[in-house]
Image (tube, rainbow, N blue to C red):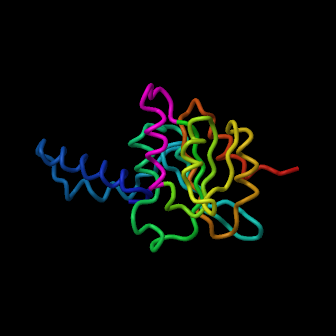
């Protein structure tokens, strides 16, 4: 299946299991997953030009609920399976009194990335918990963060951009392909 992230595979397995439970042949349905392509903001991946080479940009800029954040962040052992990883994330919203703890609780997963870029006041909590060597930059909002992420990209990087639609992280997704002049 041409999609990155365990969450895509889990969803596909659930769909095949449900189809099987309803009497459909999962073995016949499975090859259709080869044609699956995540949409913009939902895991779409694209090679982008960076300093004479390319980097892989993963656009997860539509949903930033805590389970979605954890699913998109690199899991244990990820460093052994992929090139250097940059992550850019914005505040998760509508978390009420749990917001501080939920943002801080992402530190173990976010800390597996090589470099982390954050924006928003709640993500400042996460950013402060990261080792200094992992801190790319923190900004007030996505518009301020976008040029910082663009400047940090190097050939061979994998960059994950994660945030809710309302956080406007699509600005960070577009930044690497826009001129810096």
98 magenta-colored = yes
The x, y position of residue 167, in whole percent, is 60, 33
The x, y position of residue 1, in whole percent, is 38, 60
166 magenta-colored = no
**Residue at x 52% of width, y 46% of height:** 60
Q: Which residues are magenta?
A: 92-109
Q: Give the total number of marks visible in the rendering.
A: 0
**Residue at x 70% of width, y 53% of height:** 149
Relative vertical location of residue 150 with respect to residue 157 in this rendering, above or below: above
The x, y position of residue 121, in whole percent, is 61, 35
The x, y position of residue 14, in whole percent, is 24, 47
**Residue at x 14% of width, y 48% of height:** 20
User: What residue occupies the far bottom of the structure in this picture?
Assistant: 80
Q: Is 166 situated left or right of 21 in this image? A: right
Q: Is 146 situated left or right of 35 in this image? A: right
Decide which of 55, 77 is in the foreground and name it.
Answer: 77
Q: Is 42 situated left or right of 141 in this image? A: left
Q: Main secondary structure of the magenta part?
A: helix
Decide which of 1, 117 is in the foreground and name it.
Answer: 117
**Residue at x 15% of width, y 47% of height:** 24
Relative vertical location of residue 95 with respect to residue 180 in this rendering, above or below: above
């Amino acid at each position: 299946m041409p999609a990155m992230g365990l969450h895509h595979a889990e969803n596909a397995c659930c769909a095949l299991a449900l189809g099987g439970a309803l009497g459909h042949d999962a073995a016949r349905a499975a090859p259709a997953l080869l044609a699956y392509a995540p949409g913009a903001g939902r895991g779409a991946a694209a090679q982008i030009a960076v300093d004479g080479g390319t980097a892989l940009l993963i656009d997860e800029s539509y949903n930033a609920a805590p389970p979605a954040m954890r699913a998109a962040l690199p899991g244990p052992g990820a460093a052994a399976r992929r090139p250097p990883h940059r992550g850019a994330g914005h505040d998760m919203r509508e978390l009420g009194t749990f917001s501080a703890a939920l943002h801080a609780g992402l530190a173990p997963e976010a800390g597996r990335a090589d470099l982390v870029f954050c924006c928003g006041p709640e993500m400042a909590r996460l950013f402060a918990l990261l080792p200094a060597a992992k801190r790319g930059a923190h900004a007030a909002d996505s518009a301020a963060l976008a040029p910082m992420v663009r400047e940090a990209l190097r050939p061979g990087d994998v960059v994950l951009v994660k945030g809710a639609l309302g956080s406007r992280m699509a600005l960070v997704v577009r930044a690497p392909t826009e001129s810096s002049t």
